[in-house]
């Protein structure tokens, strides 16, 4: 059994990296995000992001995180990518009264300006707007995770491997994860 977790802040590349690693290691990929939740509910992501998540706290976080934990618990071999993936077997599982084990944890470290540039490209918006929105998402996410789970996103769980993903492309980050997992 192998469960791998990949986390990082908005725009770190976790979604792309988990796709690559899942293919290479033949793992089920679990990457359920607020984007997916918004699509399922027929809500524009921007409305969910800047309106509902904060106003209806903690409803949306618990719904999203509950789905993530349930999917990971059900899978024997998987890679999960999310902001909280490296905490799924700790503070998140405890709060949701679930039991799940993560075997390998990776945090993708990327500076804000680099992440904002990636977000601007992905979402086809001006860099200045992406920078403001990414900084705000980081701040709001950190506050919600602290309030709901007691998590300080600056302090990773013991055993989490940090990968400097600023200068590596997604393939390079995936290579590093695959090497560590195969050790």
Image (spheres, helix red, strand yellow):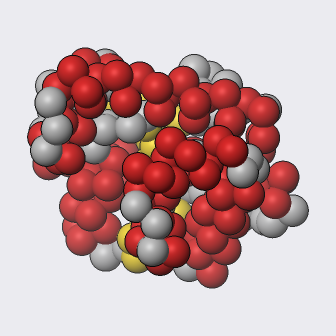
**Residue 163: where, in percent of width, then height?**
34, 31
Q: Residue at x 51, y 74 (%)?
A: 41
Vertically, is 1 above or below 92? below
Residue closest to the eye, 104 or 139: 139
The answer to whether residue 166 shows anywhere in this view is no
156 vs 122, nearest the viewer: 122
> Is residue 15 at all visible to an observer of this figure?
yes
Q: Is residue 153 left or right of residue 63?
A: left
In this view, the residue in front, 167 or 77, is 167
Q: Answer left or right for 63 relative to 84.
A: right
Q: Residue at x 66, y 53 (%)?
A: 61
Q: Is residue 134 above or below residue 13?
A: above
Q: Position of residue 84 (x, y in %)?
A: 58, 46
Residue 110 picture quarter: top left
- Residue 112 point in image, percent of width and height: 32, 20
State the quadrant of the N terminus. Answer: bottom right
How many numbered badges does the structure rendering display?
0
Q: Position of residue 179 (x, y in %)?
A: 28, 48
The residue at 81%/60% (across/down) is 96
In the figure, is residue 99 to the left or right of 77? right
At a point 22% along the width and 61% down the height, the residue shown is 20
Vertical comparison of 92 with 159: above or below: below
60 over 173 or under it: above or below: below
């Amino acid at each position: 059994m192998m469960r791998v977790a990949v986390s990082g802040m908005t725009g770190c590349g976790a979604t792309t990296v988990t796709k690559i690693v899942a293919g290479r290691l033949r793992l089920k990929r679990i990457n359920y995000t607020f984007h997916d939740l918004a699509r399922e509910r027929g809500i524009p992501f921007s409305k969910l992001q800047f309106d509902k998540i904060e106003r209806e706290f903690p409803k949306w976080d618990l719904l999203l995180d509950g789905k993530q934990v349930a999917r990971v618990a059900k899978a024997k071999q998987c890679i999960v990518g999310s902001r909280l993936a490296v905490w799924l077997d700790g503070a998140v599982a405890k709060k949701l009264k679930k039991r799940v084990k993560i075997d390998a944890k990776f945090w993708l470290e990327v500076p804000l300006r680099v992440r904002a540039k990636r977000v601007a490209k992905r979402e086809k918006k001006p860099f200045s707007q992406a920078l403001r929105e990414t900084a705000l998402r980081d701040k709001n996410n950190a506050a919600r995770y602290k309030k709901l789970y007691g998590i300080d996103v600056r302090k990773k769980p013991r055993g989490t491997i940090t990968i400097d993903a600023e200068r590596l492309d997604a393939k390079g980050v995936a290579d590093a994860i695959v090497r560590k997992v195969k050790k």
